[in-house]
Image (spheres, helix red, strand yellow):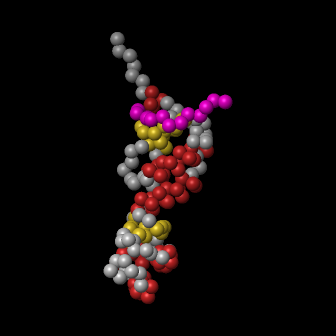
Amino acid sequence: MSEEIINRVASSKLITFNLEDHYLEGERVLFDIKDWLLDGFVLREKDFREQAKAHDWGKYDGQYVALICSSDAIIPAWAFMLLATYLQPYAKKVITGDLETLESILYAEIIEKLDLSELKDKPVIVKGCSHKPVPKNAYLLLIEKLQPIVKSLMYGEACSSVPLYKKTKG
């Protein structure tokens, strides 16, 4: 006696939310100012300004740029601000920090703008695996936005999810 196999995942009301779907396309660039410092540690204002003025900023057109100093030099805030003034006409976004910080900031801006009203009182699973770099912080920001409106939250895949939150009846 054979019974019909029913795909309960396909017929469930569970909505999958994939952060990877909101990934902003574009090249990410790490710009290290260490090489512009005397011996990699001393920022000499005149030299720094001359290098900034002579640099080809157009090559960052349409890119997301993370400014860092990989040495232990103490860099004044104005130095990063100066570089940002040169990058502003070209780069899509400029931040101070590493590439993970850049990705976190990009996702924070995306998540803040999301209209999630269609998920109100629905069971939602946040997809876990991705092929694009989704920072861990993005998942936390998404939970912060989803939890007040959804019926339940899970993480992973529909066939093997981890329950995170269930709204109490009342």
Q: Is residue 62 left or right of residue 117?
A: left
| Residue 134 visible somewhere in the drawing | yes
Residue 89 visible in the shown view: no
* Residue range (magenta): 158-170
- Residue 58 image offset from top left, x and y in percent: 42, 77
Residue 86 placement (x, y as % from top left): 47, 78
| In the displayed structure image, the side of residue 143 where residue 103 appears, left or right | left
Which residue is found at the position 58% from the left and 39% from the top?
150
Number of numbered discs on residues: 0
Residue 160 in magenta?
Answer: yes
* Residue at x 57%, y 51% (from the top left corner): 114
Name the spot of residue 84 as percent of width and height, x first: 49, 75
Q: Is residue 89 above or below residue 127?
A: below
Camera-side residue: 34 or 62?
Answer: 34
Quarter of the N terminus within the rendering: top left
Name the spot of residue 52 as percent of width and height, x first: 42, 82
Quadrant location, the C terminus: top right
In the image, 24 versus 105, the foreground residue is 105
Which residue is painted at 43% across and 67% down in the image? Answer: 66
Q: Residue furthest left?
A: 39
> What residue is at 39 percent from the left and 45 percent from the top?
129
Q: Is 79 in the magenta?
A: no
